[in-house]
């Protein structure tokens, strides 16, 4: 029995890496099912809805609903819709979005475990996702007893906006940061602006200010100087989930909660955070050993063979500097790497265990379940992207 072709409109810009990742996931779904006819207008972020939408007679919409104008146009279409924006301009519409709390956690852990106790956040408060990341990052800093300074960029569309005045304001903020400081930018574009300002005024990155962005856009991250570390959102999986859910909605099926959040894949570490802001030289040395050999099957005992301290003194000084035990840092590195491999490759669980330093798959499974709450096989079934991107993207790590 043939299935009628479904006409779907994609109101998603292709001007940034995250949105292109969403489109990649949707495309992967359409290739597998081959029953969609897609309309994809060329538009920028926040652009007016396409004029043809008022006359369009389709079956469903996947949109980044970031403005009231887009929300009104989508509502008038009266078809099943999936929203891919944190703006929630149509709260009654199912939404699939990045887990901004998890993104902030990844960025904070990355900076905190490099020894930073002074932090900054560079945000764009016109966007809900930026505010979500700011609030989560602020709470993490506060809970850890750190210091935080926030810079809220002014939107360029505001009356009396001045690029030069905004640039000077950003420079003054950077100069005022207690250094060394670890700064999270709400996304890569803001992070690159921050790096440019640091270079212009002679602030050393990452020695004085370490910077991490979000989106892992290779065009921005690899071309910036220094190259930019960035949290990697699982945009492709988000797009695929949206396509699957829209298909189910068009078929009249129940699709679960209105809001679904997708955790990031990990972090791609580049030059902008390749630093240790740790005063204790022995602890700094131990952290380098753990990072370099985390997937070689080392134990805390192996680290201690190269650090002239008793285990009790070593662990107390480690916790005093970093807020976590050496065992906890090692396990987190291994489990984050394992999670990424389970989501984005087709390696067997035994191969994943070996890749993160476990010689026995049983002990790996126990450790993974203790960290994530589920066995590795169940985690893969719930989160795997089907290796649709051809394997691992970026390098996950703390």
Image: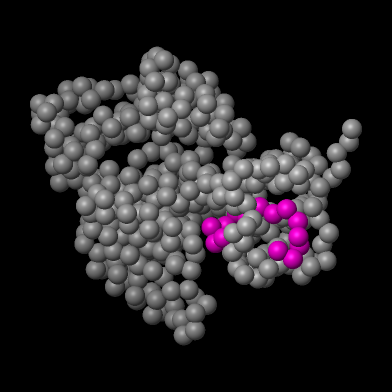
**Visible residue check, residue 227:** no
Instruction: Describe residue 70's horizontal placement relative to residue 279 as left or right.
Output: right
Is 154 located above or below residue 388 in the figure? below
Q: Is residue 379 magenta?
A: no
Is 387 located above or below residue 352 in the figure? below
Q: Nearer the viewer, residue 67 or 343?
A: 67
Residue 330: x and y in percent read 30, 31
Instruction: Describe residue 272's horizontal placement relative to residue 247 as left or right.
Output: left
Residue 147: x and y in percent read 23, 58
Residue at x-position 18% and y-position 37%: 318
Q: Residue furthest right?
A: 1
Residue 356: x and y in percent read 40, 25
Q: Nearer the viewer, residue 254 or 232?
A: 254
Q: Quadrant of the N terminus?
A: top right
Residue 7: x and y in percent read 81, 51
Residue at x-position 38% and y-position 80%: 165
Q: Quadrant of the C terminus?
A: top left
Q: Nearer the viewer, residue 124 or 204?
A: 124
Instruction: Describe residue 326's horizontal placement relative to residue 272 as left or right.
Output: left
The image's colour scheme reads one colour
**Visible residue check, residue 332:** yes
Residue at x-position 81% and y-position 42%: 35
Is 275 located above or below residue 351 in the figure? below
Total marks shown come to: 0
Q: Residue furthest bottom?
A: 160
Span shown in magenta:
75-88
Residue at x-position 33% and y-position 45%: 110
Q: Is residue 87 magenta?
A: yes
Instruction: Describe residue 114's horizontal placement relative to residue 28 as left or right.
Output: left
């Amino acid at each position: 029995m043939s299935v009628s072709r479904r006409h779907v409109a994609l109101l998603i810009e292709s001007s940034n890496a995250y949105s292109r990742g969403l489109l990649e996931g949707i495309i992967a779904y359409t290739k597998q099912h081959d029953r969609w006819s897609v309309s994809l207008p060329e538009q920028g972020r926040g652009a007016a809805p396409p004029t043809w939408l008022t006359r369009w007679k389709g079956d469903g919409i996947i949109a980044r609903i970031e403005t009231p104008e887009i929300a009104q146009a989508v509502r008038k279409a009266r078809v099943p819709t999936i929203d891919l924006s944190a703006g929630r301009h149509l709260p009654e519409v199912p939404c699939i979005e990045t887990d901004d709390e998890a993104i902030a956690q990844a960025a904070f852990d990355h900076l905190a475990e490099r020894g930073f106790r002074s932090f900054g956040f560079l945000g764009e408060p016109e966007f809900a996702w930026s505010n979500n990341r700011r609030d989560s990052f602020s709470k993490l800093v506060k809970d850890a007893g750190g210091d935080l300074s926030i810079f809220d960029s002014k939107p360029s569309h505001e009356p009396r906006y001045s690029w030069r005045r905004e640039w000077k304001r950003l420079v003054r903020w950077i100069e005022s940061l207690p250094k060394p400081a670890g700064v999270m930018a709400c996304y890569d574009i803001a992070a690159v602006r921050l790096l440019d300002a640091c270079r212009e005024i002679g602030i050393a990155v990452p020695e004085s200010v370490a910077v991490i962005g979000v989106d892992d856009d290779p065009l921005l991250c690899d071309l910036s100087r220094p190259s930019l570390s960035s949290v990697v959102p699982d945009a492709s999986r988000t797009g695929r989930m949206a396509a699957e859910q829209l298909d189910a909605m068009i078929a009249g099926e129940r699709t679960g909660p209105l809001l679904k959040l997708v955790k990031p894949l990990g972090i791609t570490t580049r030059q902008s955070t390749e630093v240790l802001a740790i005063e204790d030289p022995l602890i700094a040395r131990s952290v380098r050993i753990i990072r370099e050999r985390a997937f070689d099957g080392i134990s805390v005992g192996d680290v201690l063979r190269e650090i002239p301290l008793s285990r009790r003194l070593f662990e107390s000084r480690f916790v005093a500097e970093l807020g976590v035990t050496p065992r906890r840092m090692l396990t987190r590195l291994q489990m984050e790497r394992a999670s990424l491999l389970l989501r984005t490759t087709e390696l067997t669980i035994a191969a994943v265990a070996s890749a993160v330093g476990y010689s026995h798959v049983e002990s790996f499974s126990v450790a993974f379940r203790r960290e994530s709450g589920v066995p590795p096989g169940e985690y893969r079934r719930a989160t795997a992207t089907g290796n649709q991107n051809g394997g691992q993207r970026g390098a996950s790590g703390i």
